[in-house]
Image (cartoon, helix red, strand yellow):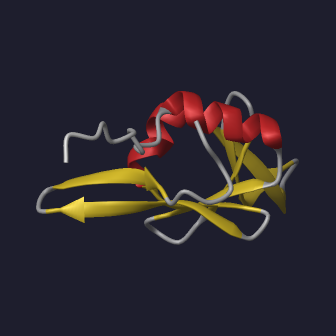
Amino acid sequence: MNQIKRDTEVTLADLRKLGQRGGVTARLVDGRTVKLHPRFGTISQKGYIAGTVEMVEVMYDYTSLYSQIRTILSNGVLIARREGTGKKSVLRLTGKGYRK
């Protein structure tokens, strides 16, 4: 029973590594989808460009997105999900699709 349990919490460095792999998306608590890139995440939403409404990609840094991420998917495989106990919730790896 004295085994050392490997830490499975997702860090900001893990998000950057996942962004380098490509094809990785994260679902936020409010239902929006974020595409992960090596240095930031982007969310598609409507915006005004030269007076017309068009779809734009809005950049967000990982520090502002981390607390809002509910799940992370890579090519259809669930990599991580948020688990909560009481007031604290942690983004944990599922053990499939990505290893530290």
Q: Where the C terminus falls, by quadrant?
A: top right
Quarter of the image holding residue 26? bottom right
Q: Which residue is painted at 68% across and 33% down in the image?
A: 17
Q: Is residue 27 left or right of residue 81?
A: right
Counting labels gives 0
| Residue 61 visible from this viewpoint | no
Q: Which residue is painted at 40% across and 51% down in the image?
A: 91
Q: Classify 51 as above or below 64.
A: below
* In-front residue for pair 47/79: 79
Quarter of the image holding residue 89? bottom left
Residue 70 horizontal/vertical position (percent): 46, 62
Q: Which residue is painted at 60% across and 38% down in the image?
A: 15
Residue 56 horizontal/vertical position (percent): 80, 53
| Residue 28 visible from this viewpoint | yes
Q: Is residue 90 left or right of residue 19?
A: left
Residue 85 horizontal/vertical position (percent): 17, 62
Name of the residue lying farthest toward the front? 1
Q: Is residue 16 left or right of residue 48?
A: left
Q: Which residue is painted at 20% across and 40% down in the image?
A: 2
* In-front residue for pair 11/44: 11
* In-front residue for pair 75/44: 75
